Amino acid sequence: MSILVAIDGWDVASWVERFQRLFPERRVATLGEPFDRREVHYVVSWKHPHGALSGLPNLAAIFSLGAGVDHIVSDPRLPDAPVVRVVDEDLTTRMSEYVVLHALAHLRQLPRYIAQQRAGTWEDDRFQPAARDVRVGVMGLGELGRDAAAKLRVMGFPVAGWSRSGRAVEGVETFGGEAGLDTFLARTDILVVLLPLTEATRGILDLDLFGKLAQDGPLGGPVLINAGRGGLQVEGDILAALESGVLKAASLDVFETEPLPVDNPLWSHPRVIVTPHNAAMSHPDTISRLIADQIRRVEDGGALTNVVDPGAGY
């Protein structure tokens, strides 16, 4: 039973080598070489070309090589096979590190002090709000969102969460669906976004949403932290909100176009922190082992875990 590596933009050869080492008795094929499509039982994908997976009659599962699956489920010719996402403790921990780092950076005005250092300016107004006075809202309460919320609470932030389904999370005030969104936003000083990208969430971070965030918080305006997906945000609206004061600042790890074009004004905006989509980089060896464990479990008669709900898209 062959494994097909369907990757665009990553080092294909290194992934082939990993899976060949884990399954020496099987052929590991790539899209760029001839192979018998009838022999392919498993696909590992990262941004495969749409339509490339059609005509695989014995396909048993498609594994994403990352936490997101929008690059897979957006394929209009996707075969009718289970899609499996990566859930990895290391990846989850790294994402929470990123979220806590940036929440604290904005709480303690780190971008301001870095700018002052570069300018050689000593300026301290002695005002430092406490974490207990800054309300954080987490959009998206999956594995990543729940862990980030728990660790933000440890730092002393009052944390609320929002999801489309209204999922309950211990110790966190939660809101659900369209009915709960405005109330959630109105009590949020720092908005952390860890939503999956679906047709329902695409472009959700727009000027209308930013205008519903709390404008009276101790940071002098709301802050956006998006480490979810680039398609969630409307970057022109982020810039407009920053210029008008509707947003005080932003930390962005994901973008509508990646890599972020060199002429994009987000690079040089004084109140934006840009990171190159590396908030939660799990080690490739870990990911390949997790996928191998899933394949062996299924072949031993077990069930796949972390399977995507086709209706929800995550």
Image: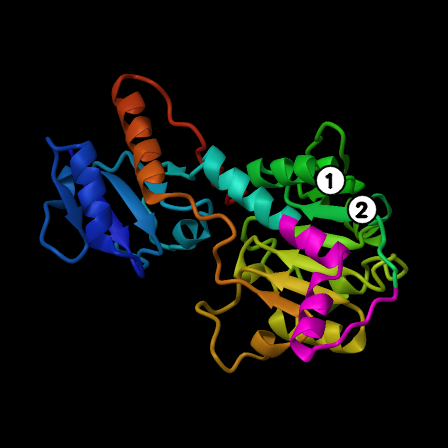
Q: Residue furthest bottom?
A: 263
User: Which residue is label 1 attached to?
Assistant: 155
- Secondary structure under badge 1? loop
Going by the numbered disc 1, the residue's amino acid type is: Met
Q: Residue 149's spot in the image, x, y percent? A: 68, 39
Asked whether the residues under the numbered discs 1 and 2 touch, taking CB atoms below 8 Å apart as contact, a structural biologist would say yes
Seen at 77% across and 41% down, the residue is 159
Q: Residue at x 59, y 38 (%)?
A: 142
Task: Give the prevailing secondary structure in the magenta stretch.
Answer: helix
Q: Quadrant of residue 220?
A: bottom right
In the displayed structure, 314 sits above or below 257; it is above
Relative image position of residue 164 (x, y in whole percent):
67, 43
**Along the line of sight, which residue is nearer the eye, 54 or 16?**
16
Q: What residue sits 54% from the left and 53% below the top?
A: 197
| Residue 124 belongs to magenta span | yes
Q: Is residue 120 above or below residue 84?
A: below
**Tag 2 secondary structure:** helix
Identify residue for label 2. Answer: 131
Task: Specify the label residue 127 is tagged with.
Answer: none
Front-lying residue, 161 or 223: 223
Q: CA distance from mark 1 to mark 2?
A: 7 Å
State which region is magenta: 101-125
Q: Quadrant of the N terminus?
A: top left
**Residue 57 in view, yes or no:** no
**Residue drawn where x is 58% and y is 49% of the image:** 98
> In the image, residue 258 lies at what x, y percent?
45, 67
